[in-house]
């Protein structure tokens, strides 16, 4: 054969046509073009255009929903964590409905912009911020579009208060978005903050640091997004409290009063106490003597006395005076309140006395008396569990003298008789009481008479009124008739053998039984102002 030219003639097409030879390929068979982390391999499609089609609001909603529900890491690293962090900070800062709507809209616009511009993998989601969550950002902008790196680094190192710890994953499940937002994304925020973390300790620590830095940037919240409590929103439930706004000043720092006025009207404090309106200890002692003198000589009404005692108690509290004089003020007010059937004010005094009795350096004067009042108060509220707690506390060796005191034993015997339903012993012990104890029992004695009458009506068909009134400790026949008339039971009174003598009168408990049971059920309910 000839040269190379003759060899090529063998493969020539007939009729002088030349065979087409393919051009040399631009890249080898097994050559792979390197891509960055998270970049799509469809290079031709990515390079064909720099933008995608604009997204509608509905498509943004669906995209946000898919990212939130993503558990297989199908979306860029940090994007889901960024969304969950925004929701967490909004909840921590107590965003209202309007602020939540703004937050959701900014999230949709930002993520939609990243996907339209094909920057979802280029953007640094760990450092991304939102205008509604930080003071410094005013426009919605991706971190990869920012050119001023110095400003960003200065912002990241600026000192902020430490962020709160992230809540447990169970508290983030099924947390609803604002009600006016699209229902498809309104109930599915965050499920697990660690879903994108890798098993290695290095990865976990790195992601934890990134989250902390992001939360520090978000910690500066606009003032219009804070749900601040109105300064006049005062809670008047606890009458022993100086003020529910006491946190605005140091309550452990005593105020030294300078007021020299003996009589002063009680006003609840809503701000830091003014020393010019607070009476010092020597003036308080003079004011106490004046009020007690008016009480003993009956020169003032109970509303005036109660107002003056509450003013005395307030001045003692703001000056943190806890001595024998403070005990005397609270004990005197408690006794006067019982004599005037003011159970709510009595309860406030005995609650404070319980705190003063616990002080180790203060002599526990009249402890037995007020312990018996507390037991009787628990009887009034049908709180036998608290009576058992007092028994356990004062039956110890160091408190055994208080437990065996006659006043305390008398109150405990009354509690035992009521617990076992022994109304005969209860009314016998009631006849032996006097003073404030008698006043306290009088507040619920008619309920116990109804209890006894309920037991009697279930045991007898007829019962003599003379015997009944003696059992219920009613002083005389007229008082007993008035008691039955108040209950509407006087129409069930019958005369024995048709005689009109009061000694032969009987109560027909068979016909009045249903009415007695109904009224006793109503009397069981206790509603006490200032109850513990």
Image (cartoon, grey):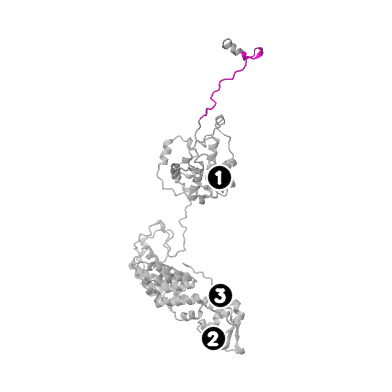
Regarding residue 79, the answer to whether it shows in the image is yes
Q: Is residue 104 above or below residue 446?
A: above
Determine the CA span between mark 2 and mark 3.
22 Å
Determine the CA span between mark 1 and mark 2.
81 Å
Residue beneath the point at 54% across and 72% down: 524
Q: Quadrant of residue 25?
A: top right
User: Is residue 16 one of those drawn in magenta?
Assistant: yes
Sequence-wise, the earlier of marks 2 and 3 is: 2
Is the C-beta separation of discs 2 and 3 under 8 Å? Answer: no
Farthest residue, direction right: 15
Question: Quick one: 321 or 65, which is closer to the camera?
Answer: 65
Q: Which residues are magenta?
A: 10-33
Q: Which mark is residue 466?
A: 2
User: Is residue 368 one of those drawn in magenta?
Assistant: no
Q: Position of residue 44 (x, y in %)?
A: 56, 29
**Element under label 3?**
helix
What residue sits right under mark 1 in the picture? 69
**Element under label 2?**
helix
Q: Is residue 455 above or below residue 73?
A: below
Determine the CA span between mark 3 and mark 1.
60 Å
Q: Position of residue 461 (x, y in %)?
A: 60, 82
Sequence-wise, the earlier of marks 1 and 2 is: 1
Q: Position of residue 279 (x, y in %)?
A: 36, 65
Q: Position of residue 204 (x, y in %)?
A: 45, 43
Q: Is residue 452 above or below residue 50?
A: below
Residue beneath the point at 58% across and 77% down: 516
Q: Residues within 10 Å of mark 2 (few under 14, many from 20)?
A: some
What residue sits right under mark 3 in the picture? 520
Q: Residues within 10 Å of mark 1 (few under 14, many from 20)?
A: some
Question: Quick one: 250 or 495, which is closer to the camera?
Answer: 495
Predominant SS of the magenta segment: loop
């Amino acid at each position: 054969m000839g040269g190379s030219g003759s060899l090529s003639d063998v493969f020539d097409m007939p009729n002088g046509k030349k065979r087409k030879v393919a051009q040399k390929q631009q890249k080898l068979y097994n050559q792979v073009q390197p891509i960055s982390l998270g970049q799509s391999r469809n290079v031709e499609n990515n390079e064909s255009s720099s933008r995608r089609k604009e997204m509608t609001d509905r498509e943004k909603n669906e995209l946000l929903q898919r990212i939130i529900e993503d558990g297989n890491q199908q979306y860029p690293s940090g994007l889901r964590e960024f969304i969950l962090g925004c929701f967490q900070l909004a909840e921590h800062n107590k965003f209202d409905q309007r602020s939540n709507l703004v937050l959701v809209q900014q999230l949709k616009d930002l993520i939609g912009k990243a996907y339209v511009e094909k920057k979802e993998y280029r953007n640094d989601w760990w450092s991304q911020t939102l205008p509604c969550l930080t003071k410094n950002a005013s426009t919605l902008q991706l971190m990869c579009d920012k050119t001023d790196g110095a400003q960003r680094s200065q912002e990241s190192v600026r000192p902020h208060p430490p962020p709160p710890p992230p809540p447990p994953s169970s508290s983030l499940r099924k947390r609803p978005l604002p009600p006016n937002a699209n229902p498809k994304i309104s109930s599915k925020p965050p499920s697990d903050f660690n879903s994108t973390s890798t098993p290695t300790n290095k990865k976990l620590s790195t992601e934890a640091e990134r989250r902390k830095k992001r939360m520090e940037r978000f910690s500066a919240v606009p003032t219009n997004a804070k749900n601040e409590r109105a300064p006049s929103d005062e809670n008047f439930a606890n009458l022993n409290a100086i003020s529910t706004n006491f946190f605005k000043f140091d309550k452990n720092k005593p105020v030294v009063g300078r007021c020299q006025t003996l009589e002063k009207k009680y006003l609840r404090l809503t701000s830091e106490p003014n020393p010019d309106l607070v009476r010092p200890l020597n003036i308080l002692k003079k004011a106490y003597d004046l009020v007690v003198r008016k009480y003993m000589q009956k020169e003032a009404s109970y509303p005036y006395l109660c107002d003056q005692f509450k003013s005395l108690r307030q001045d003692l509290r703001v000056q943190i005076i806890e001595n024998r004089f403070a005990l005397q003020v609270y004990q005197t007010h408690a006794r006067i309140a019982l004599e005037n059937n003011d159970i709510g004010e009595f309860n406030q005094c005995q609650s404070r006395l319980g705190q003063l009795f616990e002080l180790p350096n203060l002599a526990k004067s009249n402890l037995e008396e007020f312990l018996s009042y507390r037991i009787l108060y628990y009887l009034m509220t049908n709180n036998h569990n608290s009576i058992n707690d007092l028994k356990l506390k004062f039956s110890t060796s160091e408190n055994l003298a208080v437990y065996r005191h006659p006043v305390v034993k008398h109150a405990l015997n009354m509690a035992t008789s009521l617990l076992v339903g022994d109304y005969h012993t209860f009314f016998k012990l009631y006849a032996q009481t006097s003073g404030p104890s008698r006043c306290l029992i009088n507040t619920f004695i008619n309920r116990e008479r109804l209890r006894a009458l309920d037991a009697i009506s279930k045991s007898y068909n007829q019962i003599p009124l003379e015997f009944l009134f003696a059992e219920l400790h009613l002083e005389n026949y007229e008082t007993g008739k008035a008691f039955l008339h108040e209950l509407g039971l006087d129409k069930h009174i019958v005369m024995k053998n048709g005689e009109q003598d009061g000694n032969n009168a009987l109560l027909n408990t068979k016909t009045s039984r249903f009415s007695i049971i109904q009224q006793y059920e109503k009397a069981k309910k206790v509603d006490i102002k200032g109850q513990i």
